Amino acid sequence: MSETADELARRTPPGQVLTTKWPVLTYGLTPKFNPTTWTFRCFGLVEQEVSWTWEEFLALPRTEVHCDIHCVTRWSRLDNRFEGVPIREIMKRVRLKPEAKFVMIHADPDYTTNLPLADLVDDDVVLALKHDGQDLTPDHGGPLRLVVPKLYFWKSAKWLRGFEFLDVNPPGFWEVNGYHMHADPWKDERYSDQETRAMQQMRAESARKLRAK
């Protein structure tokens, strides 16, 4: 049974427009994936650094997460199905030091975004390899992207490569450039102050691609 307009509205945060497409938004070039050199690391405030090769990562247990995603450029896509490694499987293998309260997400090429540890370690967070039954394409963050459904989607970093556990909460790439430090779409936490030129370019590109669909 299809949902009513009121039901769809309840699932859509303020200021968002629904789309059935998945716009591709990337600031910079899409990196090349080399499975022979790829690694995923957990480091920083840990008792011992942990890392996986591509083959080792593919052998980890998987799950599916059904979720809505919300982009800061004002589009939302409902009913996504992501398959990948649940964050709790990663955390079973990492021994954090007591002072670890935040995480810097590291991704190719030299991208970062910050999260409180409590937002990362949640039941709906997954290190995604597939979307709607298909391998993630490079443009959408393949081979591996983080998915944190409760926050704006820039926090779900494409081309994921590592977690750095910290006792402080420094801003990542977009946060330095004016995006909100937390990014709750239901609280409209988009920007920290005013939009930078890079932010305006991303928003204009998103609008152009939505019009072209």
Image: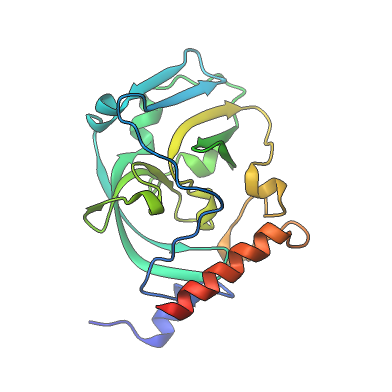
Q: From this viewpoint, which residue is outermost toward the right? A: 193
Q: From this viewpoint, which residue is outermost toward the bottom? A: 5
Q: Is residue 90 above or below residue 175?
A: above
Q: Is residue 187 left or right of residue 209?
A: right
Tally of numbered discs: 0
Q: Is residue 190 above or below residue 123?
A: below
Q: Is residue 10 above or below residue 94?
A: below
Front-lying residue, 93 or 140: 140
Q: Quadrant of the N terminus?
A: bottom left
Point out residue 119 in the picture as x, y percentages from the top left corner.
Answer: 52, 44
Point out residue 124 in the picture as x, y percentages from the top left corner.
Answer: 38, 49
Residue at image position (40%, 80%) is 7
Q: Quadrant of the C terminus?
A: bottom left
Q: Is residue 195 above or below residue 14?
A: above
Point out residue 60 in the picture as x, y percentages from the top left corner.
Answer: 25, 30
Front-lying residue, 91 or 41: 41
Point out residue 12 in the picture as x, y percentages from the top left corner.
Answer: 48, 73
Residue at image position (63%, 64%) is 201
- The image quarter containing residue 81 is bottom left
Residue at image position (40%, 53%) is 139
Q: Is residue 51 left or right of residue 106?
A: left
Residue at image position (48%, 49%) is 156
Front-lying residue, 196 or 88: 196
Q: Say how the picture is coloured.
A: rainbow
